[in-house]
Amino acid sequence: MAVKLFVGGLAFATSSDRLRETFAVVGTVASASVVKDPTGQSRGFGFVEMETTEEATAAITRLHGSQLDGRALRVELSEKQGPSAGGRR
């Protein structure tokens, strides 16, 4: 089962493909996406799903604090959002 990671500190120019390429050096990337606002502008964060827990742990260890497109990445396990998590409806 894929493990979802939160990736913060992205440069506005960083694409989902670039994010995928960066995490692929650590393991198999199931998906990678940069979150965008309604105008299509990056919101400066995204999510990457790694195939295994081991690969997700390796990604956090190797990539947290590393530089991508001139910005320091923040990589951590994504928090589960259940029905009571709130947010927009």
Image: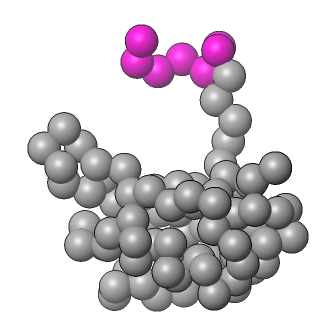
The magenta span reads 83-89
Q: Quadrant of the C terminus?
A: top left
* Camera-nearest residue between 51 and 58: 51
* Camera-nearest residue between 37 and 1: 1
Position of 81 relative to 2 (above/below): above
Q: How far across and down, in percent of the image, does residue 28 sit?
A: 69, 72
Q: Quadrant of residue 52?
A: bottom right
The reply to whether residue 70 is visible in this rendering is yes
Left-right relation of 80 to 20: right
Position of 72 relative to 75 (above/below): below
Name the residue located 61 percent from the left edge and 21 percent from the top edge.
85
Q: How far across and down, in percent of the image, does residue 1 sit?
A: 81, 50
Residue furthest to the left in view is: 39
Q: Quadrant of residue 88?
A: top left
Name the residue located 19 percent from the left edge and 54 percent from the top edge.
41
Left-right relation of 64 to 21: right
Q: How far across and down, in percent of the image, does residue 44 sit?
A: 34, 60
Name the residue located 67 percent from the left edge and 52 percent from the top edge.
4
Q: Quadrant of residue 23?
A: bottom right
- Helix, strand or loop: magenta stretch: loop
Q: How far across and down, in percent of the image, does residue 63 sit?
A: 62, 81
Position of 88 relative to 73 (above/below): above
The reply to whether residue 10 is visible in this rendering is no
The number of callouts visible is: 0
